[in-house]
Amino acid sequence: MSWDPALYLKYGGERTRPAADLLARVPVTDPSQVVDLGCGPGNSTALLATRWPAAHIAAVDADPNMLDRARRSGPRCRYVHADIAAWQPDQPPDVIFSNAVLHWLDDHAALFPRLVRLLPAGGVLAVQMPHNFDAPSHTLLRQVARGGPWAPTLEPLLRDKPVAALETYHRWLAPLSSALEIWETTYLVRLSGADPVLSWMRGTALRPLLDALDPKAAGMYEAAYAERLRDAYPREPDGITLFPFRRLFIVATRAEG
Ligand SMILES: C[S@@+](CC[C@H](N)C(=O)[O-])C[C@H]1O[C@@H](n2cnc3c(N)ncnc32)[C@H](O)[C@@H]1O
């Protein structure tokens, strides 16, 4: 899968808002080492640099397009090309921050405790992930993928439940944490223009599926998906389309020992 920073940043304000809401709950005053795990185009990194101007920030991402964009327009910091699944910090980080990233990775039962164990006592893991996989935007994406001639190509890429229940993260992280906050927020995103939910999804969850198909099949799949989205997300009388988007937040402070 390759990312398109411009497409992603078409909704940069709406996508960065949860990062700001997450950062507001991080109880660390003066960290020395901060990591932005899955920095994307650098929008979340910029928030970290503004809050902690004296910190050494490492911004990690696996996608060359996103990293290139972050290097050009993100804050001055160390940009690291790495896969989070195998990433190890050079220095123990005081904060590991990850906005809209970890739902792309599997095996959260191992990943989340591993990230907390990378922190010194008092260090914080702060994570936000979409928790919207049962919303029409995502169920229709999978239904249409499974219902056409493209199904054999797309089936291996479909992920029905990439994010676990809130209680499950609590059970995994509580034994390692001296403080643990887990919550959800539903943002009522207001979109404008034609096929706006499709346009939003093109920047994220739709990308791997379109990448896997030849242009003709990709066009047909996208058209079928767009038609279903229009019914699921009708335009309001004022021309706006309402797109409720649920997100899960975790702030875990590493316990001693
Ligand atoms: C939706 S963007 C989030 C960007 C930014 N953090 C934000 O707040 O908007 C997800 C980013 O995670 C990166 N990513 C996904 N899986 C990754 C992995 N296994 N290792 C490193 N980066 C990954 C992608 O390349 C992409 O840049």
Image (cartoon, rainbow, N blue to C red):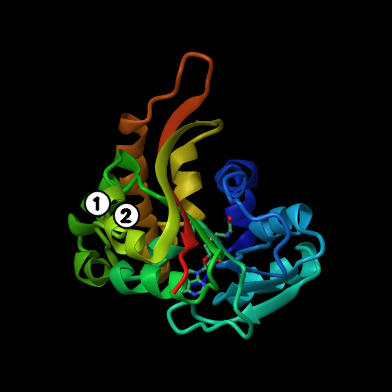
Query: In what element is the residue under mark 1?
Result: helix
- Residue that label 1 marks: 144
Position of residue 88 in the picture relative to residue 110 (left or right)? right
Q: Along the polypeptide, which appears first: circle 2 or circle 1?
A: 1
The structure residue drawn at horizontal position 62% and vertical position 68%, both measured from the top left corner, is 94
Query: In what element is the residue under mark 2?
Result: helix
Q: Amino acid at mark 2?
A: His
> x, y (%) of residue 206?
41, 57
Q: Amino acid at mark 1?
A: Val
Quadrant (top left, top right, bottom left, bottom right) of the N terminus: bottom left
- Asked whether 248 or 93 is in front, the reply is 93
The structure residue drawn at horizontal position 53% and vertical position 84%, both measured from the top left corner, is 88
The structure residue drawn at horizontal position 32% and vertical position 74%, both measured from the top left corner, is 110
Quadrant (top left, top right, bottom left, bottom right) of the C terminus: bottom left
> x, y (%) of residue 47?
70, 53
Position of residue 64 in the picture relative to residue 98 (left or right)? right
Neighbour tally class for label 1: few under 14, some 14-19, many 20 plus, Cα within 10 Å:
some
Q: Is residue 247 visible?
A: no
- Residue that label 2 marks: 170
Position of residue 131 in the picture relative to residue 238 (left or right)? left
> x, y (%) of residue 145?
25, 57
> x, y (%) of residue 183?
40, 42
- Name above or below for residue 81 compared with residue 55: below
